[in-house]
Amino acid sequence: MAIFSMIAISFIGLTANAHTVAEQPQVVLTDLAAAKAVGGFILSEDEELGVATVYLNADQINLLSSLNHSQGKCAGFEVLNKEDSAQPGKVLRDLSQTHQRISFFKSALAPQINFNEDYQKLIDQASALELKKTVSWLASYHSRYHQSANPNQHVHDLKVKLNSWLRNAPWSYTIETIAHDSTKQLSLRLRIPGQRSPHEVVVLGGHLDSINKPDIDKPADPKARAPGTDDNASGSSNLIEALKLLKQVKSFDRTLEFYWYAGEEGGLLGSAEIAKEANANKRKIIGVLQLDMTLFAGSGQQVIGSISDFTSPGLRDLFYQINDLYIKSKVIESKCGYACSDHVSWHRQGYPAIMPTEASFKSMNKFIHTDLDLILPSSNFDHSNNFTKYATLFALVLGNSSIVIE
Ligand code: BES
Ligand code: ZN
């Protein structure tokens, strides 16, 4: 680090003597891959964030700018001031530790969104206590496994409960179970038709099923207790609680679809069929939010993961903006490394999807897929409550705008 700082200081000396600052080399904060592509001298880099501080001459800055524009993206870089130029490592540390919008310095951008006080007032009402009640109820089923003796009891019960919870909603909705070829278990869909652009659809989903399969090499026991509290009564309940909040919104421009998927633990069974059919019918899905495991704060309080494989950079950026404006958690971009949840089904059909989750992949709850995936002292309902807020905001921001993610 000391070496980097000395280099930066001597560069600044050069800049100060210049006639026109713009033509002189500058220290720039930008996307790591873009910095390398234009041949800049990297002063510091953060591989996980995918950003770098880089020393660039005027030609390289022009190249960086046109590189981004040629890809239909905004500039996405910032020329650092004197003080920051002298401490490029600190700039990146601050960036990762504060709530700044890291994606701005990266190349893929969603349109900029603004703070909405009404949205804030709505999410302020999200209740960790109500969430706990809903999670406890779902986890009280012996199992929600797709090959259990009674794989649909909880699906039918959720349908009945949703109708009761949404009785006085100002908007009309439909709710239906969805049968599948690949499993006997049903998925559940709740649809709120959009009032302006009903053919544009915003999807929010999570898997409702659970499994008891502690050993990867052994088959699941269809009779065993599978409470699936964190995985995934938590995400399923966030969607329910978000709907209860959205009852206070008169109408939506776009159609909202909420899914509780069947058979995720059997290999993304329900979501794969649903996403495939959406594509076959050429449905215009604007964005997909997947919630899977939100109850264990394994990376710390106010720290969450954003899964970066099989997801859309543009939609991840929109999520960063939502987080920066309202929730202000630290977001760690993290890969599953394989097709770990239902967002992959949508991604494979070409739809933009995201999966914000409880922690970075390596720090996720280790009790999942066992009879110990219960409400535990480590369960954190305030942490999970933020995911109710993310879901509510996702529905509002995409459902009441004309934002399109490239
Ligand atoms: N909730 C998990 C996915 C997960 C686990 C995400 C750990 C992040 C950290 C999901 O329900 C699951 O168990 N997925 C399976 C794969 C699926 C295709 C059967 C898995 O991870 O093994
Ligand atoms: Zn699982």
Image: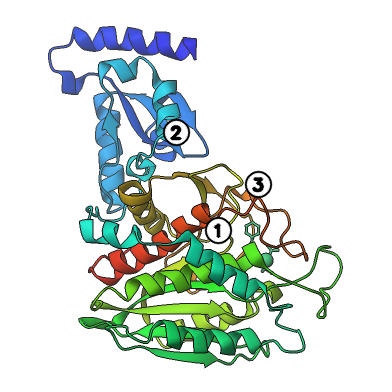
> Of tags 1 and 2, which is closer to the observer?
1
- Where does the image place residue 265, in percent across and percent down from the top left? 68, 72
Q: Amino acid at mark 2?
A: Gln
The quarter holding residue 35 reads top left
- Where does the image place residue 337, in percent across and percent down from the top left? 63, 54
The quarter holding residue 195 reads bottom left
Which residue position holds label 2? 97
Graded by Cα atoms within 10 Å as few (under 14), some (14 to 19) or many (20 or more), the crowding at tag 3 reads: few
Which residue position holds label 3? 362
Graded by Cα atoms within 10 Å as few (under 14), some (14 to 19) or many (20 or more), the crowding at tag 2 reads: few
Front position in the image: 332 or 297: 297
For the residues marked 3 and 2, what is the alpha-carbon distance in whole angstroms? Answer: 19 Å
> Of tags 1 and 3, which is closer to the observer?
1
SS at mark 1? loop
For the residue with label 1, is its CB less than 8 Å from the closest atom of ligand 1? no
Which residue position holds label 1? 294
Q: Amino acid at mark 1?
A: Thr
N-terminal label among 1 and 3: 1
For the residues marked 1 and 3, what is the alpha-carbon distance in whole angstroms? Answer: 14 Å
For the residue with label 3, is its CB less than 8 Å from the closest atom of ligand 1? no
